[in-house]
């Protein structure tokens, strides 16, 4: 087993902008990834299995709801700390970061922001500790980029709601204890419901044969006349803006996470280029390889600055959906481009599991699509700067 020798690039000395708390949080996550994720992740990706034994470690480093207040089990950290944790986890693997992102931004956040005090106390501490895991049901078989077209629905039956429908491409679904599900009521208004495993008619079949996010568990959510207690409705916000608010938080985390994947690919390629000798010298001494490496560190640096400024805006409550959208699209596109260039520097070795690059590349093919596709985010920016929607 090869040791994890990762060294993070910091070309513009961004560490000088971080607080001591930021650095402590990041370094704790980095050390955990080196110790508990890097040694096993290739094996689990190869056998397409989620390493469930890491859930406790994710909780210990504060990856579950780090910005949730301590009275509900969270760490009470700021948004930059959240981003740094996601960066370090995705440096290990995008699928592991997906598990943490879903738990934090798509399960804990809506319960905290839209739920009742009773719901917060019932679910958040167990979710923060990893004792309970959750998933988020928005995407449907026929409604991905257009979630407002969902057909999953619930009706009022007096003492309970009756939920019917299906959700697809749901991270954590196969093992989740609860699902935050978005469905339309009889008037067509979208609401969030907390559905618990064990409710009759609720099933979570796993999705197999993935080429991407292989160390992450993905599945469906099937609702066949599921009786949901009325106290499980999230009353704080309804309409499509409610789930989209959750996606803003998740996309923000992805903007940081993608930097981690890019840094791992760059660091691997830089180290390899310095050791691989061809024509009597290391390939790091050739012009074309230096061009690749120089462009990589430039793009990573730009993405780091973008994410840091966005984190400041998030802390101030001033980050807009469009700003978050831009960062998600840019940083994931940057990461997948770096993965492809890094793979070329490694030549044939780049496709093997001895190095992480091909795994990152395959994972990023999913990251560039989920939480809003690359093209959809371009249109969100276009809408924001022109004032004209291209969606309809």
Image (tube, rainbow, N blue to C red):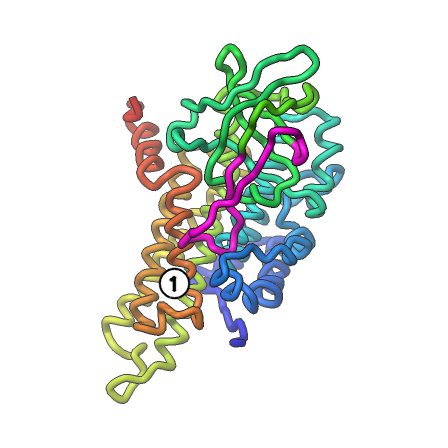
Q: Position of residue 214 (x, y in %)?
A: 47, 55
Residue found 76% across the figure and 38% down from its top: 71
- The answer to whether one can see residue 319 in this image is yes
- The answer to whether one can see residue 311 in this image is no
For this orientation, the residue located farthest to the bottom is: 280
Q: Which residues are drawn in magenta?
A: 196-221
| Element type where label 1 sits in the image | helix
Q: Which residue is mark 1?
A: 358
The question of residue 203 being in magenta is answered with yes
Q: Is residue 224 above or below residue 292?
A: above
- Using residue 118 as the reference point, say whether residue 54 is left or right of it: left
Q: Position of residue 31 (x, y in %)?
A: 61, 65
- Using residue 199 as the reference point, say whether residue 310 is left or right of it: left
Q: Quadrant of residue 1?
A: bottom right
Along the line of sight, the residue nearer the viewer: 18 or 180: 180
Q: Residues within 10 Å of mark 1 (few under 14, many from 20)?
A: many
Q: Is residue 138 above or below residue 291?
A: above
Q: Position of residue 81 (x, y in %)?
A: 59, 49
What is the chief secondary structure element of the magenta stretch?
Answer: loop
Residue found 47% across the figure and 57% down from its top: 260
């Amino acid at each position: 087993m090869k040791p994890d020798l990762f060294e993070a690039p910091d070309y513009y000395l961004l560490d000088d902008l971080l607080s001591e708390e930021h650095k402590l949080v990041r370094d704790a996550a980095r050390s955990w990834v080196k110790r508990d994720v890097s040694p096993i992740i290739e094996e689990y990706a190869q056998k397409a299995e989620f390493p469930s034994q890491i859930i406790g470690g994710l909780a210990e480093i504060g990856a579950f709801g780090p910005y949730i207040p301590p009275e509900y089990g969270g760490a009470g950290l700021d948004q930059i700390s959240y981003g740094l944790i996601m960066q370090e986890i995705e440096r290990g693997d995008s699928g592991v970061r997906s598990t943490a992102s879903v738990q934090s931004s798509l399960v804990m956040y809506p319960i905290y922001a839209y739920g009742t005090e009773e719901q917060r106390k019932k679910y958040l501490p167990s979710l923060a500790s990893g004792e309970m895991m959750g998933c988020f049901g928005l995407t449907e078989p026929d409604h991905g980029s257009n979630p407002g077209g969902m057909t999953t629905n619930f009706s009022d039956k007096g003492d309970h709601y009756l939920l019917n429908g299906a959700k697809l491409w749901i991270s954590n679904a196969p093992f989740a204890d609860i699902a935050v599900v978005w469905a339309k009521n009889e008037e067509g208004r979208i609401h969030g419901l907390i559905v618990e495993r064990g409710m009759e008619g609720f099933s979570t079949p796993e999705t197999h044969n993935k080429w991407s996010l292989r160390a992450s568990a993905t599945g469906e959510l099937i609702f066949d006349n599921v009786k949901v207690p009325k106290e499980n409705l999230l009353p704080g916000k309804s309409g499509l803006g409610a789930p989209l608010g959750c996606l803003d938080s998740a996309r923000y985390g992805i903007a940081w996470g993608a930097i981690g994947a890019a840094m791992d690919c760059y660091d691997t390629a830089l180290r390899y280029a310095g050791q691989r000798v061809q024509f009597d010298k290391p390939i790091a001494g050739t012009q074309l390889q230096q061009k690749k490496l120089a462009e990589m560190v430039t793009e990573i640096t730009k993405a780091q600055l973008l994410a840091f400024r966005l984190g400041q805006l998030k802390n101030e409550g001033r980050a807009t959906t469009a700003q978050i959208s831009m960062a998600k699209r840019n940083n994931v596109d940057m990461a997948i481009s770096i993965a492809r260039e890094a793979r070329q520097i490694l030549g044939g070795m780049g496709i093997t599991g001895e190095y992480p690059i091909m795994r990152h590349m395959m994972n990023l093919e999913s990251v560039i699509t989920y939480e809003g596709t690359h093209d959809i985010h371009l249109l969100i920016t276009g809408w924001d700067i022109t004032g004209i929607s291209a969606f309809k």
